[in-house]
Amino acid sequence: MKRILLLLSIAILILACNKPAEQTSTTTTSASTTTQSAPVPSPTPTPMPAPPTTTAVAAPQPAAGALATQQTNWKGITAEVTEFRRKGNTLTAKVRLVNHGSERSEVDIHFEEVYLIDTGAGKKYNVLKDEKNEYIASLRTGWTNRWYDNITAGESYVLWMKFPAPPPETKAITLQLPGMPPFEDLAIQE
């Protein structure tokens, strides 16, 4: 019987030596020697880094006093809607252009490319014109259809424009300016 136990112990010891991932512990009793294998916890998997994505950057959060903010296609320039107010038959939009970059940037707004879109009603509202066919908006001196200027680093400019007011039941509408994504569903201030 002792021989069998001895051979069995040697066989277990040989098997244990061939398994490097397992640890062995020996418990001795008065009658015989027993070898038990304790389970070894599996190694914690290393999380793989997330694959690079090509999704668009989230729209910036509105700055203090801004109703909505968008990045623009002009280097360093952010556009912030600071007022979007209906008064009588007109709606006035004010947009602050801020240069957060380190160099000046030339911004060019053609008012024929600026409009409101009411997707629910399927209507488009263009910037109003006066009796001389000039846009009722921030215009560059000598121009009747556009505004452009160089905005130096750290500076800003407030651009404004007037539209025909949508009906009173329209509480939000989209503002589109060239060179930037649309300002979707802007709440109309009364």
Image (tube, rainbow, N blue to C red):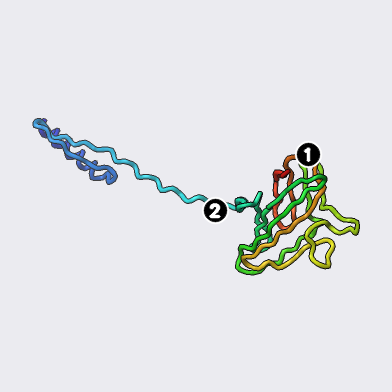
Quarter that holds the N terminus: top left
Q: Quadrant of the rendered structure where residue 36 is?
A: top left
Query: Where is residue 12 drawn, in percent x and y?
Result: 21, 38
- Dot 2 alpha-carbon crowd within 10 angstroms: few under 14, some 14 to 19, many 20 or more: few
Nearest the camera: 188 or 150?
A: 188
User: Which residue is rendered at x = 76% and y = 45% of the image?
Assistant: 86
Q: Which of 10 and 185 is in front in this view?
A: 185
The label shown at residue 13 is: none
- Which quadrant is home to the C terminus? top right
Task: Give the CA distance from mark 1 to mark 2.
Answer: 46 Å
Q: Residue at x 57, y 52 (%)?
A: 53
Give the vertical position of 156 relative to 45 (above or below). below
List the residue tagged with mark 2.
Answer: 52
Q: Position of residue 71 (x, y in %)?
A: 65, 56
Mark toward the viewer: 1 or 2? 1
| Nearer the observer, 160 or 102 | 160
Q: Residue 78 sits in which quadrant?
A: bottom right
- Report which residue position mark 1 lands on: 168
List x then y, in percent, for residue 82. 68, 52
- 86 left or right of 9? right
Mark 2: which amino acid? Pro
Q: Residue at x 70, y 52 (%)?
A: 181
Q: Do the residues labelled 1 and 2 touch (CB within 8 Å)?
A: no
Chain-order first, disc 1 or disc 2 = 2
Residue placed farthest to the left in the image? Answer: 30
- Three-letter amino acid code at the position of disc 1: Pro
Neighbour tally class for label 1: few under 14, some 14-19, many 20 plus, Cα within 10 Å = few
Q: In this view, does 188 lie above or below 3?
A: below
**Front residue of 125 and 15:** 125
x and y, in percent, of residue 151 in the image:
68, 66
